[in-house]
Image (cartoon, rainbow, N blue to C red):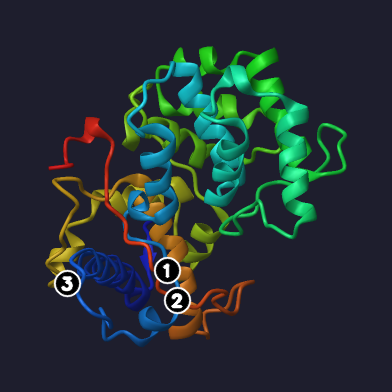
Amino acid sequence: MNKLIKRDKIYDLYWYFAFERQNIFFKKKQKKPAPWTNDKILQEYKFCNTYRVNDRISQYLLRNIIYNGKKYKDEDIIFRIILFKLFNKEFTWELLEKEIGDITLIKFDFNIFSKILENAIINGKAIYNDAYISCANKAFGYERKHENHLALLRKMFFEDKIDKRLLACKNMKEAFDILKSYPLIGNFLAYQLVTDINYSDVVNFKENEFTVVGPGSKRGIAKCFISTGDYSNEEIIKYMYDHQEELKRLGYDFKMIGNRKLQLIDCQGLFCEIDKYCREAFPELKSNRKKIKKRYIAKKEPIDYFYPPKWRIND
């Protein structure tokens, strides 16, 4: 197998970013005053957490959609997760809950849901999170994006019984393939969905047998490596997962969440973030993205961090 050829400065920067962004997370969690870092780029721009599960949307999903203190059927958990993630926005979920009540599969009605969301759009409200752009084609023949997504849910759950199919899966790859087979769901979104479903206790897939590389991660890999040799992008992610001792080599006292090392999806996400970071730190490493879109704005609402109970790290 042809060897990897690292771009040493950027490869080491990957581990620096993982360490420094995690330190920022802990300082904010401990309610220490800003600035939480001397790194001007990390002060100025918005970056995702080192661990995906610590990002605000993931925490909202855990606290409000999956583990909100109520008991749900397995099919309801899967439905709630996919519904939430298609829009990926707290406002949209809370709007639907306000109008419909507790959201379960039996309460899904295309026309009612569509009317609620249409009224929000008419009133100038954004119903989609712009963190990632979900596919917007007219796969089900509707003019409105949200109507096509609601039609997708109708097909998934009422025609295809996707909940039963997912519950029968033996691993993450099987579930990913089912999700990816649907219109409006590409590789990236299917991987996000299967990861979020795996946060629940209705399935228990091994996380580190499977990963998928998104477009941002591909750009980050190209910046960290001069050549990837015979390695696929997914094998590069696994390589980083297997080489977390690099943090020690570089002198970084990395603080995990509980006893949980970085997972494949975290290593994948870090490549996306290092691509963004390099746009400011090393603009000569060109890609099709030249600027970091979002500047950092502190959120007023603190997060009471919570993790899937099966991880056994909440204490």
Whether tag 2 and tag 1 are in contact, CB under 8 A, the answer is yes
Q: Nearer the viewer, mark 2 or mark 1?
A: 2
Mark 2–mark 1 distance (CA, rounded to whole Å): 8 Å
Amino acid type at mark 2: Tyr
Residue 275: image x %, image y %? 48, 69
Question: Residue drawn 37% across and 60% down?
Answer: 4
Mark 3–mark 1 distance (CA, rounded to whole Å): 22 Å
Q: Which residue is mark 1?
A: 47
Q: Is residue 26 left or right of residue 212?
A: left
Label whose residue precedes the other's in the sequence (3 or 2): 3
Q: Which mark is residue 174?
A: none
Label whose residue precedes the other's in the sequence (2 or 1): 1
Amino acid type at mark 3: Leu
Can the viewer see residue 183? no
How many marks overall? Answer: 3
Q: How many residues crowd around disc 1 within 10 Å: few (fewer than 14), some, or many (20 or more)?
A: many
The relative height of residue 143 versus residue 74 in the rendered view (above or below) is: below
Q: Is residue 232 left or right of residue 206?
A: right
Residue 154: image x %, image y %? 70, 23
The relative height of residue 57 versus residue 291 in the rendered view (above or below) is: above
Whether tag 3 and tag 1 are in contact, CB under 8 A, the answer is no
The relative height of residue 67 versus residue 155 in the rendered view (above or below) is: below
Q: Which residue is mark 2?
A: 296
Q: Nearer the viewer, mark 3 or mark 2?
A: 2
